[in-house]
Image (spheres, helix red, strand yellow):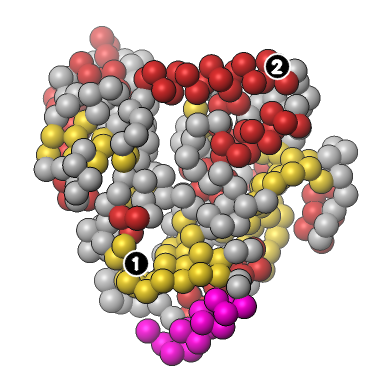
Amino acid sequence: MDTLYLQFLNEMQNKGSLKYYRNYPLSLVSTIGTGGRADFYVTPYDLQTLIAAVNEAEKHGKYIVIGNASNLIFDDRGFYGTVLSTVKIRALGVIRQPRNEEEKVLFSRVEAEEFFYATCGTWLPSLSLAALNLGYSGFEGLCSIPATVGGAVCSNAGAFGCEISDNLVALQIYRPTLKKTEMIFRNSMLFSYRKSSVGKCGEIVLCAYFAVKKGSKTEIREKIEQNKRKRTESQPMGVKSAGSYFKKPAPSEGKICYRGKSAGELIDLCGMKGYKVGGAQVSGKHGNFIINATGLCRTADIKALARSVKRKVYAKCGIKLKEEVEYIPYSGKKSGKRKAKE
């Protein structure tokens, strides 16, 4: 790795602007607990440092930008390059007047007296809790999703009938190719079930802005508690996983008798609950969760188990399951850039 890059990282770390590690195990980063080592693992503490780190990393090899890595699965061989994590960039609140040039554009384009905002590393449960404290409704379904705002926007994360795009009105993003930040608005973004156009051209989410709607704090709290109970009752807790592994199939797909069923229901009907490959196992509590059952699971085990599940479901139900998780491949010691999310 270029000595200039090391010099940059050391200088920024000495200033207290970031923390970096060499040869860092990605099994400690991903919530499913697998993956090899990253050449560099960097956690900037603010948006300006994130931008500077992206610019330097791009000069000196491959890099990816991630959030909480709650739906990412890293290759067993790791990632040769820089993994930049936004998890330390956490700020949220209400703005009633613009703080920078981009927000001036926001106030001029969107008719509202105030906006609810969150930076890219803000944890979704924190966003949901802050909305409750402020009396804002519409964020209750995000209360148990272990993801950051930036990654959630890029995958349109959601649960219990709520998606992060529901109240989104604008994003502040950084375009590495143009070396500029800008404000983009909801009408220029495309969202669908667990899909988003954001990030597809390498742009990095810096801050998200949401429309606000006042509601009853009592009702909001009741919805949050209800959602938390549902999650506890239906999903595996206290184990390493990447959350829901497969997307819900299209309602018109497959044999008629299996249409409209969730991925978990289909996997259960195929008798795959508890099925194991190496250290990976289909949860006995919820069929759409693949868990690191032994703590020593490999990514190769997870992918092999997922292939078995997909084959079984297709053979019985005529439905091709599609992953909701994202695989981050081994980058190899070659030039080039890659950006990831969540």
Q: Where is residue 258 in the image (x, y as percent from the top left)?
A: 27, 14
Residue 318 visible? The answer is: no
Pick the front one: 166 or 279: 279
Q: What kind of residue is marked 1?
A: Tyr
Drawn side of residue 185 relative to residue 270, left or right: right
Pick the front one: 120 or 59: 120
Highlighted magenta segment, given as a residue range: 1-15
Residue 9 falls within the magenta-colored stretch: yes
Q: Is residue 229 above or below residue 49?
A: above
Q: In this view, does 213 lie above or below 94?
A: above
Residue 164 visible? The answer is: yes
Q: Going 36% across and 30% down the picture, which residue do you hit?
A: 237
**Which image quadrant is residue 238 in?**
top left
Q: Is residue 266 above or below residue 240?
A: above
Q: Is the magenta stretch mostly helix, strand or loop?
A: helix
Residue 216 falls within the magenta-colored stretch: no
Q: What kind of residue is marked 2?
A: Thr
For the image shown, how many numbered marks are present on the structure? 2
Pick the front one: 76 or 247: 76
Q: Where is residue 284 in the image (x, y as percent from the top left)?
A: 23, 24
Q: Going 35% across and 41% down the picture, which residue do you hit?
A: 242
Whichever of callouts 1 and 2 sits on the residue coming sooner in the sequence is 1
The residue pinned by badge 1 equals 24
| Disc 1 from disc 2: Cα separation | 44 Å
Q: Going 61% across and 44% down the picture, which residue do you hit?
A: 189
Q: Going 19% across and 49% down the picture, which residue do you hit?
A: 296
Pointer 1 local density, CA inside 10 Å: few below 14, some 14–19, many at least 20: some
The residue pinned by badge 2 equals 218
